[in-house]
Image: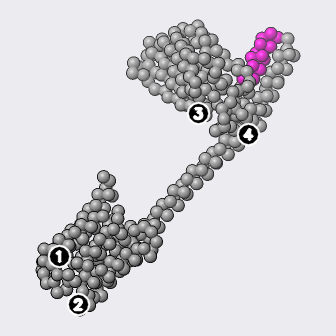
Amino acid sequence: MGRRRVLRVAVDVLLALLATAAGGGLELADPSADTKLLTAPTWAYVVAQVVAAALLLSRRQRPYTAALAIAGISLFAPAWAAVLVPYAVTAYGHGRRWRQWTVIGLLTVAFLVGASAWSIDDPFTAPAVILVAALLGMYVRARRSLLAELTDRAERAERERSLLADQARADERVRLAAEMHDVVTHRINLMVLQAGALRVSTVDPAVRAAAEELRATGCQALTELRDLVGVLRGEGGPPVVDPRPDDTPELVRLVDESRAVGLPVRLTEVGDPKAVAPTVRRTLFRLVQESLTNVHKHAPGAAATVSIEYGRHTVSATVANTPAARSPDTVLAAAGGGTGLAGLRHRVEVLGGTLTAEPTARGGFAVHAVLPVRVSTAALS
């Protein structure tokens, strides 16, 4: 039971006790039946007051029933609960306003008849108190409705701000994609064309080989840039298969290169890598490449394991290494900008994946990534 509900029950119990004490106390203090419509023993009047007070416990859930039942009891013994229940009728009663005031009118008439109002000196105080209680209930109900409406407006405004922020981010992504396509892609295209021209025009084999490598690297950069532009423009679009050929080197070749320089690496691949989009395969390649590079730099003498699991909807990749066998070269470890993992995380998140990098319990280090099998590349150009 919540704190608010406990408070409501406590208030209802307190009002019931108050009505019992006031009604029963007055019946015992003045047992005369001269002001009653019906004559009965004093204990019967006290019981009537207690029953009417107990009905206040249901005033929130069934206000009309409680009010009409108290009205019936008031015909026999004017109940002090009758001056409290009109608040519940107007504050919690459902239906049209005339229905509420009809019930309150019946309650008032029953109270006056039961009290033989025509034979007492002050027949106006009780109806006035009943009216005040009903008006107070109307005020509380109106205030509660106003607060609910203001809360709803605030929530709608918050949702609208969130939608506007999402739209602004989407617009910014499209703008960035356009800038990358119009400016960066154009410059890289020029570099590739110039490298191709140099390869054809030169007679030096070394220059020709360097120009070819530059041209191939530029072509791969263009492919990856187009992938990124497609992801930025097509975020949220339907996943499609990248129709362009994938020229990413195989992971086996990358692992063999690490082994050739003295790093023991064990590669495990489960599933069909051909079902994975080229964009995802390139990201996996960069992930393994960066992770193995970090092992070379920061954990000399360690052994590494590369585990790739190709699923139906996601690809899971883990690169873990054992503790370093010797201290790393400080110059080599300090080389680079220190943003390799941050760049990988951003690249993985752009594709809709997740990446974690943390020390292992045995003193090594592990990089784990989960990527979707397909990404949107509808905006290729």
Report crowding for label 1: few under 14, some 14 to 19, many 20 or more residues within 10 A (C-alpha). many
Is residue 121 or residue 214 the one in the foreground?
121
Report crowding for label 3: few under 14, some 14 to 19, many 20 or more residues within 10 A (C-alpha). some
Q: What SS does tag 2 mark? A: loop
The magenta-colored residue range is 204-220
The disc placed on residue 178 is: 4
Residue 232 covered by magenta stretch: no
Residue 214 covered by magenta stretch: yes
Q: Residue at the location (59% across, 19% down)?
A: 289
Q: What SS does tag 3 mark? A: loop
From what the image shows, is residue 190 above or below residue 22? above
Can residue 292 be spotted in the picture? no
Q: Where residue 84 appears, x then y in whole percent?
A: 29, 74
Q: Where residue 276 appears, x then y in whole percent?
A: 63, 23
From what the image shows, is residue 220 above or below residue 63? above
Per the image, the residue denoted by label 1 is 45
Q: Earlier in the sequence, mark 1 or mark 4?
A: 1
**Is residue 144 left or right of 257 when viewed as pictured?**
left
What separation in Å lies between label 1 and label 4 (alpha carbons)?
A: 86 Å
The disc placed on residue 120 is: 2
What separation in Å lies between label 3 and label 4 (alpha carbons)?
A: 21 Å
Is residue 46 or residue 373 the one in the foreground?
46
From what the image shows, is residue 144 above or below residue 45? above
What separation in Å lies between label 4 and label 2 (alpha carbons)?
A: 90 Å
From what the image shows, is residue 125 above or below residue 142? below
Per the image, the residue denoted by label 3 is 352
Q: What SS does tag 4 mark? A: helix
Residue type highlighted by circle 2: Ile
User: Which quarter of the picture shows residue 100?
Assistant: bottom left
Query: Magenta region, mostly helix, strand or loop?
Result: helix
